Image (spheres, grey):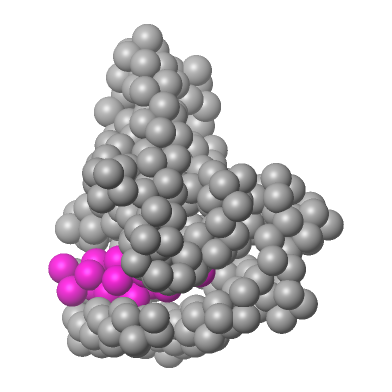
Amino acid sequence: MNLILVAFGLVALLAGGDLLVRGAVGVARRLGVSPLVIGLTLVGFGTSAPELVTSVSAALAGAPGIALGNVVGSNIANILLILGLAAMIRPVTAQMAGLPREAAWVGGSAIGLAVLAALGQISVLAGITLLALLGTYLWGAFRSAAAPDHEPGIPADPLPKAATFLMIGLALTLGGAIALVDGATGIARAYGVPETVIGLTLVAVGTSLPELATTVMAARRGQSDVALGNILGSGIFNILGILGVTALVAPLPVDAELLPDIAVMLATTALLLVLLFWRRGLGRVSGLVFLLTYAAYMAWLSQTF
């Protein structure tokens, strides 16, 4: 039964995330909201909706290891697995406007999470602080971003159809997240696998499927800015937004066993930023190295239980 719940949850998250983004963009465009606003908010947040709902559900279910592991594991998977795969398909160049600002927020968010983890708990006050920082980031993004010269590559559905997609996508995302958390928790307890490991692997990769689809499609179309921006923005939102909201719902104690994985996240983030500024992007060789590194990380995790 747990395996069925996990399988249903993964499928529902993938389908729900796609419908949620398409519906949200369709509604926004029909209501006259600019493509810039859509790109910075609805699309970016929409692809991270599964992580948000899953982490909140895990916290409410008394599984903080899954909630935290989901965020840490998603950030690692976004860089090593998803961006590595995108670079293998087509080299990703770092030409996006405002890259230094985005890089500073990505690096700063990762360091902030490490500091909170060292304190042993992400409290309600910390959650409020993280959300305030997210608001600051978004305010700066709106002020500094140039208007795009193209519309988002998502169909502009009629308003009733878009609204239906939005509601169905939200329902699937919520239901999929609950099923995934319940099934993953059941597997962890039945086989003695730590909840943190489940969160770092199965749950993290499952909730990153919308980012995978978006980034790979952008890479295939040669839209490096979209592929890279999706990963950087998701990393920022995962820490500031998802952990911020989750901590408001239920303060998150940090298991000491998660600290090495947070160190891996820091090292992975640092490696990405070095490549972006030193090599101005990721070629196929870098993509292969990222994928092999992720495989090695998964192999290391399998030896921890």
Side of 56 where 35 appears, left or right: left
Q: In which quarter of the image is the C terminus?
A: bottom left
Residue name at image x 68 percent, y 61 percent = 252
Task: Reply above or below: 6 against 85.
Answer: above
Residue name at image x 34 percent, y 86 percent = 303
The x and y percentages for residue 182 are 42, 46
Quadrant in the picture for residue 187: bottom left
The x and y percentages for residue 98 are 55, 65
Q: Residue furthest front?
A: 190
Q: Which residue lies furthest to the top in this view?
A: 160
Quadrant in the picture for residue 205: bottom left
Q: Quadrant of the N terminus?
A: top left
Q: Say if the magenta span includes residue 77.
A: yes
Q: Is the magenta stretch mostly helix, strand or loop?
A: helix
Q: Which one is in front, 42 or 166?
A: 166
Segment tinted magenta in the rendering:
71-89
Residue name at image x 26 percent, y 50 percent = 3
